[in-house]
Image: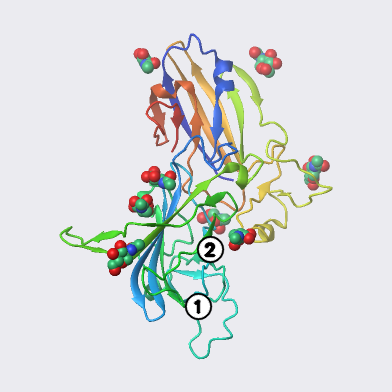
């Protein structure tokens, strides 16, 4: 199990902020705000924008570069990565791809000789893995579908692939934009809007002295909803303080219950001989968590320990423990809302960024 810790010191008068009131006021989210809309109250403008730039017309279609930008404040697309799908408007086929692939070829039996990469009406695209041969790569590809946020890792906040489409329109008047875009990350959670034809993208040369432009561009915007993603929380908070030995554990069944009768295998014990096969078993590809058996059954536990509580300031130590055997969370972040976080005076072992200038939030 991985556990990481750090400390936060918060300044300001605590006259009105008795310790327990502070603790009760804490709302902690591990990339998992609880909203029921297809938007996130902590990141209301957050979205993933998918841009298609047609770079070249071909005798029976076009070559496009498709790029996904993660414009969310703190939500990464983590391993095992994104899956992008759509429905073709006509009878298009994918002749070839660079930097990604479809999960299925589909029925290409009517093609003699040259066989397309994919003939499905509703292809599903996945990223290639790191270490893909150079002749199958393009810029921003081949990261196993992982897309970080601009906030935390701007160099890895976009993902691209190139697609050659046949049996399609060959001018900007006859080409039809694909419909019904779906983005899985890899589970549910995102809802994508309609593709909108926008002003063609301009590409500047390195010295900025010349711009070329796409022949045609369309954008699709996808937004995240926790409600669509899963109905149970993904983390819980346990509490303790310097003046009392009692640890208030995460409530039993915070994220689900150990139910050996009806759902055997819903969790795995650390010493189980089946642990390794369970890690690689069903659910690996869909990103389903495989949690260690605990009373709370959460993949993540946040422990909030009050170290000091003075009139002028208080200090807490936060420890995050990963109980999900399928995830390493190397690029983790923690979003915390607290009314005093507009006056953080000292931080240890965390990087911190307020999500809004006025809001009380902390994240790494
Ligand atoms: C922030 O904390 C310092 C003391 O640590 C205090 O002097 C100051 O008034 C506080 N500011 C706000 C806006 O609460
Ligand atoms: C998506 O996010 C970007 C960056 O925050 C923003 O400029 C854009 O307006 C957003 N798009 C939509 C459709 O909300
Ligand atoms: C299509 O191309 C013509 C020029 O060939 C251009 O005037 C027009 O704006 C383009 N339309 C779109 C939607 O890009
Ligand atoms: C859109 O895609 C979803 C999921 O792939 C599918 O269930 C639905 O029927 C599609 N709708 C249309 C109009 O193609
Ligand atoms: C389309 O998406 C790209 C990438 O996010 C963005 O730069 C561009 O402004 C968008 N165009 C429109 C018209 O929203
Ligand atoms: C510590 O907290 C527990 C639970 O709230 C309480 O029952 C106990 O009396 C407290 N002990 C002290 C020394 O305050
Ligand atoms: C489920 O089984 C585990 C070990 O096999 C046991 O520790 C736990 O108490 C059981 N839970 C329930 C709800 O029966
Ligand atoms: C997590 O990291 C460890 C050590 O680097 C590695 O052995 C393991 O395969 C990783 N697990 C996953 C699910 O990525």
Q: Is residue 14 above or below residue 159?
A: above
Q: CA distance from mark 1 to mark 2?
A: 16 Å
Q: Image point 36% across, 49% down: which residue?
A: 154
Is there any visible trace of residue 239 in the rendered image? yes
Q: Looking at this view, name the residue that lies furthest to the right.
A: 261
Q: Which residue is mark 1?
A: 117
Q: Looking at this view, is 250 or 178 the one in front? A: 178
Q: Which residue is mark 2?
A: 86
Q: Looking at this view, name the residue that lies furthest to the top.
A: 15
Q: Position of residue 135 (x, y in %)?
A: 37, 76
Q: Looking at this view, is 265 or 221 the one in front? A: 221
Q: Looking at this view, is 295 or 114 the one in front? A: 114
Say which element carries label 1. Answer: loop
Q: Position of residue 133 (x, y in %)?
A: 41, 74
Residue 62 figure quarter? bottom left
Say which element carries label 2. Answer: strand
Judge: label 2 CB < 8 Å from ligand 4.
Answer: no
């Amino acid at each position: 199990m991985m556990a990481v810790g750090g400390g936060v010191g918060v300044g300001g008068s605590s006259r009105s902020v008795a310790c327990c009131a502070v603790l009760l006021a804490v709302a902690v989210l591990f990339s998992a705000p609880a909203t029921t809309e297809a938007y996130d109250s902590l990141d209301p403008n957050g979205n993933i924008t998918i841009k298609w730039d047609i770079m070249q017309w071909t005798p029976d279609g076009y070559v496009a570069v498709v790029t996904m930008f993660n414009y969310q404040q703190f939500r990464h697309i983590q391993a095992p990565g994104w899956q992008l799908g759509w429905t073709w408007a006509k009878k298009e086929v994918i002749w070839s791809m660079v930097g990604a692939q479809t999960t299925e070829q589909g029925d290409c039996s009517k093609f003699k000789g040259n066989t397309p990469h994919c003939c499905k009406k509703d292809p599903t695209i996945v990223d290639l893995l790191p270490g893909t041969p150079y002749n199958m790569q393009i810029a921003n590809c081949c990261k196993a579908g992982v897309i970080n946020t601009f906030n935390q890792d701007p160099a890895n906040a976009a993902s691209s692939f190139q697609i050659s489409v046949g049996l399609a329109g060959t001018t900007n008047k006859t080409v039809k934009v694909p419909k019904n875009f779906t983005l899985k990350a890899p589970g549910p959670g995102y809802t994508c809007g309609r593709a909108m034809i926008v002003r063609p993208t301009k590409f500047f040369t390195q010295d900025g002295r010349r711009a070329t432009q796409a022949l045609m561009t369309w954008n699709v915007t996808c937004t995240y909803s926790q409600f669509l993603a899963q109905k149970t929380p993904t983390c819980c908070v346990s509490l303790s303080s310097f003046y009392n030995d009692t640890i208030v554990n995460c409530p039993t069944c915070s994220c689900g219950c150990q139910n050996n009768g009806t759902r055997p295998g819903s969790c795995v014990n650390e010493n189980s001989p089946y642990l390794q096969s369970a890690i690689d078993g069903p659910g690996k590809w869909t990103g389903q968590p495989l949690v260690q058996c605990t009373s709370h059954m959460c993949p993540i536990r946040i422990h909030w320990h009050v170290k000091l509580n003075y009139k002028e300031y208080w200090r807490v130590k936060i420890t995050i423990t990963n109980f999900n055997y399928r995830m390493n969370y190397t690029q983790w972040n923690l979003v915390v809302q607290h009314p005093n976080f507009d006056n953080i005076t000292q931080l240890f072992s965390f990087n911190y960024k307020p999500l809004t200038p006025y809001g009380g939030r902390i994240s790494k």
